[in-house]
Amino acid sequence: MATSQTPEHLRLAEDAQRERNWKRWGPYLSARQWGTVREDYSADGDAWKYFPHDAARSRAYRWGEDGLLGWTDRECRLCFGLALWNRRDTILKERLFGLSNPQGNHGEDVKECYYYLASTPTHSYAKALYKYPQRAFPYAKLLQENATRSREEREFELEDTGIFADNRYFDVFAEYAKAGPDDSLIRLRICNRGPELAILHVLPTLWFRNTWSWNCTHEGCELKPRISHDAQVDGLVASHQTLGTWRLRLDGIRGDETGFQSWLFTENETNTFRLFGSTDSTPYVKDAFHEYVVEGRHAAVNPDRVGTKAAAHCVLTLPPGAEQVIRLRLAPEQAEEPFADFDAIFTGRIEEMHRYYETKLAPSLDSSQRSVVTQAYAGLLWCKQFYQYIVEDWLRGDPAGPPPPPGHMLSRNEDWSNVFSRDVLSMPDNWEYPWFASWDLAFHMLPFARIDGEFAKHQLQLLLREWYMHPNGQIPAYEWNFCDVNPPVHAWACWRVYKIAGRDDGRDRLFLERTFQKLLLNFTWWVNRKDIVGKHVFAGGFLGLDNIGLFDRSKPLPGGESLEQADGTAWMAFYCGTMLSIALELALHNPAYEDIASKFFEHFVEIVDAMNGLGGQGLWNEEDGFYYDQLAIDGASVPVKVRSIVGIIPLFAVEILEQSTIDRLPGFRKRLNWFLTNRRDLAGHISYMEGMGSHGHRLLAIPSRDRLLRVLRYVLDPKEFLSPYGVRSLSKAYEKPYTAHCNEASYCIGYEPAESRTGMFGGNSNWRGPVWFPINYLLIEALERYHHFYGESVQVECPTGSGNFMDLKQVAQELARRLASLFEPDAQGRRPIYGEDAKYAEDPYWRELVLFHEYFHGETGRGLGASHQTGWTALITRCFGVLAARGA
């Protein structure tokens, strides 16, 4: 692995030290702004209905922007994106189409084919691909077919319509390269993959986000900007109060090499006549380019060549197999010959990107594995989005607009007026989930820490700041309901990023200390709000696992019972153990942290005691050898005997204490010894004592050695949890569904390896059988920690019943191998993520393209849910790292 400082390393350093603003521009433009909570001003909170796709081309957005393969500054003031028309579509293609949650038979779902191919951390080079059909886009067919399908059937995708038959589509590549922090080169390459000559209208579009129509007073509401025609060079001049003046040049106009027709101008303002039947404030509105190109209404654009939205209208005539390149340059000032060094800059940036990733990829990875890893990083980087949501203004409404209906103030997030988000954030998926989700983001930061440690640390700190974290200490979950409770993984992410993203002068203790202080507030919120009876047993709600339970765990139970959650309690032990490790690390440099380390040690022991022994067996079931949720009914605890990932999460709460560390902390050591001497009743419930005298490690964990082995028998059993592609979220044993009876009602749960058959939490994700990356990855890390303590003394059968025994490190590597195999082509070129789709195995224009889905079929490995959730599925980069270490 190369270790030299590449130009990209230097750019990252300059940006981190604020010497040069290399990250000012990037692919921060969302893929979807319509249908979001931020744009919803309805009385009932129905965001999908209030702002549908059909309105997106005509209605100015209040809080953000979206576009096709776009580019913008970090405050989303000036935006660049593509618009396309194949002469058959009914609308100009300016944004990606997909079904809303009520329209899809498995919830919201993008219905387009696009791929993120490359990016450096500073976006000095970035590349993406959109496949645009030459036939009329089947909007109606996608809606109608999905509407007729039940939850028992698969989603009907764009590829299923046959629209790509005979390769009748255009490959549209968008590439960006930076000559400097504020100098963006844009190269659009359009390829006709079809058998006949085809004509394509291409409109490279520059526009300002509408910040002037609302009369808001906070930062970011500037005077109306302006884009005008620069007659001297036949380009654009864009002027903004805070961003300054920018110029966009298009190469080849005079020779007409680009098929250039004219510059088009309009305003980024709502077409109120189309949407509401009222008079427009301007004759030139947001959807003018659609009117001009598709409807042929030339009066729709401003003949004075001025506005807040402008485009170069190019018409390309492409013979079969031909391609054409459009070159543009966006910069504050343009050289006299802005395209003289254009291709050389692209060549240099691409070479620098390869050099940079050579320092990040293990040499043992083959070319196919390297392609998967680099595309995973690309998707992660392309899903950085500008996100603005100022809750107080959103609830109250804007001075320039009508007041929101009465129900709006109570629709959601009314208790989060502190949230003032106006940042570039890492999104789970920039179409299906174009908003931050706190526990998703925590997982994103591990792969980010490998390629851009400063960004990873900044993101984790950001959600702990006072303009995100609630005054009571809760971290906002996601915009649909900030009050929902996600698993408390933020501390773990901070701890892991601290260790992964080292600096030249060592690890960043200031980052760790800052986050620790704020995490103390969040930990206290958990203890005060989720340990209802004060017995160290937690009921956190659905905890991000959506439909994993017999009933919706985020709502009151049907008969008023309370639920003692195995995962909620285990997550808190996991949180507590991580906080202990952080406190010990900080105590090595500041003795004041020894006291708080003692507090977390003792609290961990209390939670483990409750988990294993409260009321006799705690949440452990000795008969089955598994951890279960329990219903508290009339003073008795009744186990909910469903083997799901809920009962595996207790394995995650494992920490190793090094004796050498303890010896350096006399205050902590004294309290530790007192506790072990005087509270043997509690110490006996954990595995802490097992390592004493055998080596320099000590183990803190929920399960004893025997219980760990019993749970692992289920985890590694192909008839239970072990899929060919990782660990399932629900045991396969429930192919015959499990039924429970409570208060004269019956509740049923069955193994569902693919899409969800229930509408719980919208039905667009499923925790009843598929393979999910975040849980698998946490299990891999936990097994590595157990091995660090137990070493070769623990051998388990893997798979269960095979007669093949492994130590726990080897089991972790085996799980990583199974996850990695989702993306690796077999001898016929088929990747499990694509199921039986032959084109991804055989077609040279498809077979190297990789998508990173939300979750994966528990039997076949086919990708499911959101198709660009490179966020936590980018953990595949860590899995390949585990495999590379095995071969080292």
Image: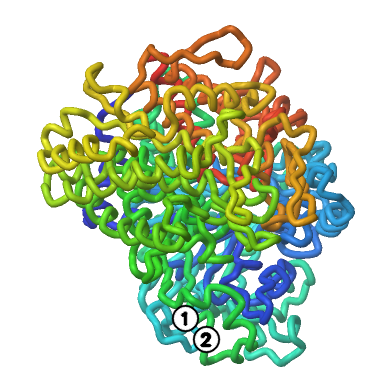
Q: Are marks 2 and 1 in contact (CB under 8 Å)?
A: yes
* Residue at the disc numbered 2: 396
- The amino acid at mark 1 is Glu
Mark 1, secondary structure of its residue: helix
- Residue 671 is situated, as x and y percent measured from the top left of the image, at 17, 42
Identify the residue at horizontal 71%, vertical 42% (top origin). Answer: 192
Q: Nearer the viewer, residue 363 or 468?
A: 468
**Callout 1: few (<14), some (14-19), or many (20+) C-alpha neighbours within 10 Å?**
some
- The amino acid at mark 2 is Arg
Lateral position of residue 593 relative to residue 189, left or right: left
Q: How many marks?
A: 2
Q: Quadrant of the C terminus?
A: top left
Identify the residue at horizontal 84%, vertical 45% (top origin). Answer: 161
Q: Nearer the viewer, residue 224 or 96?
A: 96
Distance (Cα) linking label 2 and label 1 = 6 Å
Q: Quadrant of the N terminus?
A: top left
Q: Is residue 265 visible?
A: no
The residue at the far top in this view is 803
Please identify the quarter of the rendering in which residue 66 is found. bottom right
Q: Is residue 337 above or below residue 785?
A: below
Please identify the quarter of the rendering in which residue 635 is found. bottom right
Q: Nearer the viewer, residue 186 or 77?
A: 77
Q: Is residue 109 above or below residue 655?
A: below
* Residue at the disc numbered 1: 392
**Callout 2: few (<14), some (14-19), or many (20+) C-alpha neighbours within 10 Å?**
some
- Residue 769 is situated, as x and y percent measured from the top left of the image, at 68, 37
Please identify the quarter of the rendering in which residue 554 is found. bottom right
Q: Is residue 740 visible?
A: yes
What colour scheme was applied to this rendering of the protein? rainbow
Lateral position of residue 581 relative to residue 556, left or right: left
Mark 2, secondary structure of its residue: helix
Q: Is residue 820 above or below residue 669?
A: above
